[in-house]
Amino acid sequence: MHITLIAGTRPNFVKIAPIIHEILRRKRLGVDVEYSLIHTGQHYDTRLTDLFFEELNIPEPTVNLGIGSGSQALQTGSMMTGIEAYLLQHPTDLVLVVGDVNSTLAATLSAKKLNIPVAHVEAGIRSHDSSMPEEINRKIVDSICDFYFTTSETATKNLQLEGKKSDSIFFVGNVMIDTLLQNLPHIKDNKTLSRLNLSSKNYFILTIHRPSNVDNKDKLVTVLQNISEQLKDYTIVFPIHPRTESILKETNFKASNIQVIQPLGYLDFISLVNSSKGIITDSGGITEEASIMNIPCITLRSNTERPETCEFGTNVLVGNDVNLLNKSIQKILENNWKQAQPIDKWDGKAAERIVEVLRKMF
Ligand code: UD1
């Protein structure tokens, strides 16, 4: 059996790591399974790619298409052309895609048009907000792929409501949490806190990169100013995404308690989250990680495709509502935040389940 994995952005790498490790483990046990990894090159900065390969022990990609940035259509189209050319020259039994980024969409379209079966890891999650490119990607990928690996019963139900056959859907759990649980024991000696002059529970983390939150300069500055004022007695560590950085550079924004730093590697980031007082973010993956680490998490979005992070985890949605944001910040400061509950199958064994399903199927 030959599986071709396709990935291109930072969160993709966190998700493919445990799947590749599981494939390699089975191969060592004598199972007849091979894999190739196509890196689309959607993310290309060392801190968004190489660092993750190194820290998560992901072997070098078989090929890097080096597509880079561009408009939605240009980026997706260029990736499709590159992926198609590769797949034509390198036959495979299955293409496996993860998440909801443009690389995921391009890979699925190219493979399906070559009649190659596609499996989608993290299938079925829906924000019902089509203004997000990710939601469009999720819907299209799930409308044409063949096998669905879901992180929750809600995602499974979404797929069933969309008419997918039950025997093509597998509720396996969350590969991002596999990576987290594998790596948490490795952060004991991490030096990020001392390097940044921070002490445990005395700082917040801020990450913000969604076009809807950062592309409008005034809106971005207003949110940052408000957070800075609400947390005037705390440091706010702000690992900045390149998209946000280039927009913020066009403003005069400065706040003495907001410490802007370059994007962090995986271990440094989870180590920082683990000792923080709280997180303010617009990322989806971070809400999952915060929920498992039981760290209060405020999401600057009015919807989520990951409802279990709100129902069982530590996540609260505040959207654009400044009052709600401020009330939520106060709740964290008063140590009055909800406690995380276990989430079904977010137990570190998702990749094992995925590869087992594929082994039986092929
Ligand atoms: C992408 C995903 C988003 C995910 C995020 C994780 C899509 C539609 N969006 O958003 O779901 O949460 O990755 O980070 O696929 N840039 C660099 N260096 C890089 C990559 C990007 O400087 O290595 C800059 C470029 O100016 C680029 C911009 O960031 O134009 C946006 O990059 P892009 O890959 O289009 O989307 P992200 O915002 O990273």
Image (tube, grey):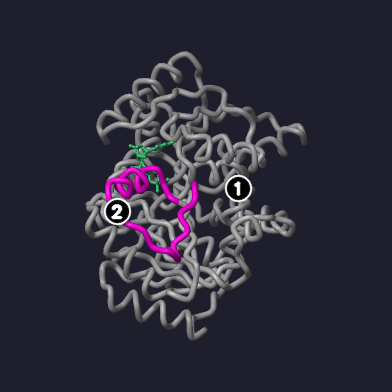
In the foreground, 110 or 145: 110
Q: Is residue 243 above or below residue 292?
A: above
Task: Identify the mark nearer the N-term, 2 or 1.
Answer: 2
Q: Which mark is residue 15?
A: none
Q: Which residue is mark 1?
A: 351
Q: Is residue 121 above or below residue 310?
A: above
> What is the spatial separation of the Cα atoms under label 2 and label 1, in whole angstroms?
45 Å
Q: Which mark is residue 252?
A: 2
Residue 305 picture location, percent across and down: 36, 59
Residue 31 picture location, percent across and down: 71, 33
In the foreground, 14 or 190: 190
- Say whether mark 2 is within 8 Å of ligand 1: no
Residue 65 picture location, percent across and down: 45, 23
The residue that appears at 22% across and 57% down in the rendered structure is 218
Residue 347 picture location, percent across and down: 62, 61
As shown in the figure, which amino acid type bears the numbered disc 1? Ala
As shown in the figure, which amino acid type bears the numbered disc 2? Asn
In the foreground, 207 or 237: 237
Image region (quadrant) for ligand 1:
top left
> Residue farthest to the top?
89
> Residue 358 falls in which quadrant of the image?
top right
Task: Answer whether residue 80 is magenta in the image.
Answer: no
Q: Nearer the viewer, mark 2 or mark 1?
A: 2
- Say whether mark 1 is within 8 Å of ligand 1: no
**Quadrant the N terminus occupies:** top right
Q: Is residue 134 above or below residue 66?
A: below
The residue that appears at 45% across and 18% down in the rendered structure is 86
> Residue 155 falls in which quadrant of the image?
bottom left
Looking at the rendering, the stretch of residues picked out in magenta corresponds to 240-262
Specify few, some or many for label 1: CA neighbours under 10 Å numbering under 14, 14-19, or 20 or more.
many
The residue that appears at 47% across and 66% down in the rendered structure is 279
